[in-house]
Amino acid sequence: MYLIVGLLLVTRGLAVTPPPIDVFIEEEHHEVIPHWVEAVKRRGWMKADLIHIDGHSDMDYPRIIEDLPVGHPPINDKQISAMMQRNDQFIQAAIASHLVRTVYLILPTWTTNSTVATNASLGQTVMTNGQRQFCICFNEESDAVCQTRSLHTISEEIEVSPSQCVNRSHYQHIELNSRNAAGVLRFSKTRALPQNDTAHPLILDIDEDFFGVQLVGMVLANLDCEMQMAVHISESLREVLCLRKGTSDEEMLADAWFRGFINDIKSECLPDGECLDFLDNATLSGECQAAIRRSANGIDPTIACTDGDRVDFYVTRLAQVLAYLTPEQLDEVARIGACFENAWRTHAYEGQVGLCLGHNIPGASIVPEFVPSYRDLIGLGRNFTRIVKSILPRRPDVITIARSARDGYVVRHLQPLVEAVIIKVIKGVFNVSDENFHFSEYLAGGKGGWINRHSTNKSG
């Protein structure tokens, strides 16, 4: 009896320590899905509130494919994989799988100044060719407006009747800009984040391109290198390098070989600093041919597509493509590097290697560019801090961060600084310790990032 009373007196004086928050840093955004699944599963599959801070919406919807869980949470790895089709379709995949009930989409002011709030739903419709695909409906509290993807153009939406969009998963869609988001999350009568909700999990999701976007290929374009040449380089790389494990170490092994090969081309095949217009081996100097053979023999067998004479043939063909470039263009190609064209864990991805330009190609991208000044970064950092603080007193069940470097969104030379700012804010607001930050083994360039991949002091 006295022992029990003593324990009660002691525990009354102790502050309740909240459970630690795990923070997962991934490369491409759809790679966060397994962490979301685990967070919702721990809460008995109660749908989550999602705060998604990003440079663009990521609200495209995936294809309806075998194993995609529609109308229920995923029950195995195949279903989780089917939710990871693309880096802009994972949120709607989570909605279709009954993981999310509310989406707070927070965009920077350099993208939008609008505020939108609506009850929405994701359903299914059958197209004229019999194909089943997702449809989305807005304004369900009044006159619903539904749309789906055109069969002819992937970026075009067509209107469908609400009666043709069936089996819907309902969610609340709240789109905010970073300037007013903190006030809405904390004080809005109709749109505020429920502060005392302990039943539903909370997911805080951050894309580092919130702080800016730069098209990787723009520097090449400014050096008068046509994007078709980049395509030829990627095609030739795929004949030489075949990666089988998908890890960051394997990716950097391939990139290191490519960088060394470019240096050999510059020193042995372009001795006068002039690009060559050769079409076959007959015009290559003996020094150049010897350098190509050394490079072919120097490929780690674990990443080579083939061996023997076939390696020499494909490496020579890659050299022929590269030798059309000027030394300045070759320097930029080496800086861009060779990497996976998609995240290794992307559903049905075959692990192809190419020039590390990402998905945003100059002249073929609808994503706006914004390379922030130091003053811009200060302003974005302040807005970001206010947004994260406005979540309190609720604490996220999980925090996920996407670098978006490999896929060509984040400003690569600023990525380490941006990530440091994000981590500092998260540590300060939620008291997260270093051991609760988890860096994926699939990060492009490892923990230090793609831009720092050749640094001798790179950690991780």
Image (tube, rainbow, N blue to C red):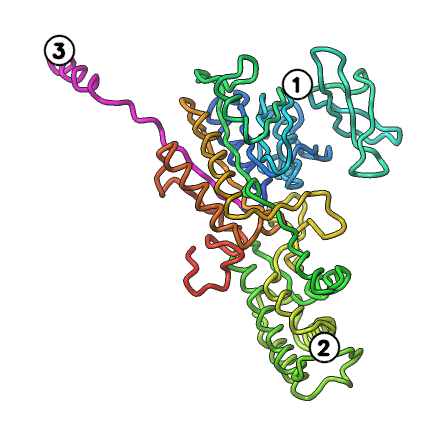
- Foreground residue among 179 and 59: 179
Q: Earlier in the sequence, mark 1 or mark 3?
A: 3
Asked if 404 appears above or below 179 in the picture, the reply is below
Residue visible at 68% across and 88% down in the picture: 286
The quarter of the picture where the N terminus appears is: top left
**Residue bounds of the magenta highlight:** 1-26
The disc label shown at residue 1, or none: 3
As drawn, is 425 to the left or to the right of 166?
left
The disc label shown at residue 183, or none: none
- Foreground residue among 349 and 103: 103
Query: Which residue in the protein does label 1 denote?
Result: 118
The Cα atoms of the two marked residues, 2 and 1, are separated by 57 Å
Amino acid type shown at disc 3: Met
Labelled pair 1, 3 in contact (Cβ < 8 Å):
no
Between disc 1 and disc 3, the foreground one is 1
Amino acid type shown at disc 1: Thr
The quarter of the picture where the C terminus appears is: bottom left
